[in-house]
Amino acid sequence: MKALHKEFVALAVLTAVAVGGTIVSGNAWADRGGDRGGRCASSEREDGWEGHGHRGHRLAKALGLSKEQKEQIKAIFRKHRDEIAPLRNEMVSERRELRNLILSDKPDEAVLREHAKKIAATSGDLAVRRAKMFQEVRTVLTPEQLKKFRALQEKRDRRIDRMMNRVEERHSSGE
């Protein structure tokens, strides 16, 4: 039973990390559905990355994006919006379904594993599309901005690692 519990915890942590990666990536600044029918929030604003919420504003500021760069990035996000939004919505739906399966009265391990594979496939599709989008974004960034972006990603990774270590320490100490 304890081994099964550890597998569920590991699955939950991996899912959280995968979704966290999705959020931080290109669609970090995209609308999460709302009343826009999956359209990107920046399509209604004039300030590029800054139109994608607080995190996008901080990123644009940290990188020192010019107005022209913000407009170019905004256009890239718009270009990819229609292919990313349905996958993002599918990911949310699949994660909810997995959560319901986990919380069911009698979780079936085979069903859970199969559903986790579906989530992994969708996550892979999102990763490929985000990579294509980022390849376009990187052409807009200067070498210095790209270096800053990578440093911010590394800093975020260290923060996530610390968080995961704290969670693991709590679990191993029996909390």
Image (spheres, helix red, strand yellow):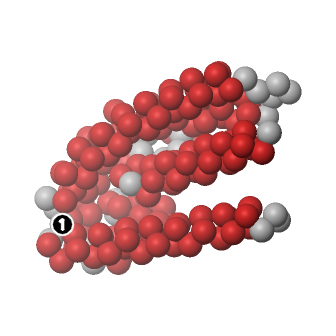
Judge left or right: residue 44 versus residue 163.
left
Q: Which residue is mark 1?
A: 141
How many C-alpha atoms fall within 10 Å of the one at disc 1: few (<14), some, or many (≥20)? many
Q: Residue at x 22, y 56 (%)?
A: 137
Residue type, mark 1 in image: Leu
**Vertical relation: 100 (above or below) 81:** above
Q: Residue at x 55, y 48 (%)?
A: 14
**In the image shown, does 81 or 17 lie closer to the viewer?**
17
Work out whether 6 lies above or below 67: above
Q: Is residue 153 left or right of residue 74?
A: right
Estimate the x, y position of residue 174 in percent, counting from the top left: 81, 64
Query: Is residue 161 visible to us here?
Result: yes
Task: Say whether residue 118 is left or right of residue 75.
Answer: right
At a point 57% along the width and 37% down the height, the residue shown is 92
Q: Is residue 28 visible?
A: no
Nearer the observer, 47 or 148: 148
- Identify the image quadrant of the C terminus: bottom right
* Closer to us: 7 or 128: 7
Q: Quadrant of the N terminus?
A: top right
Give the image quarter of residue 86: top left
The mark total stands at 1
Apparent side of residue 7 relative to residue 158 in the rendered image (left or right): right
Residue at the (76%, 27%) spot, across then down: 107
Give coordinates of residue 33: x percent, y percent: 54, 40
Q: Position of residue 13 (x, y in %)?
A: 61, 51
**SS of the residue under disc 1:** loop
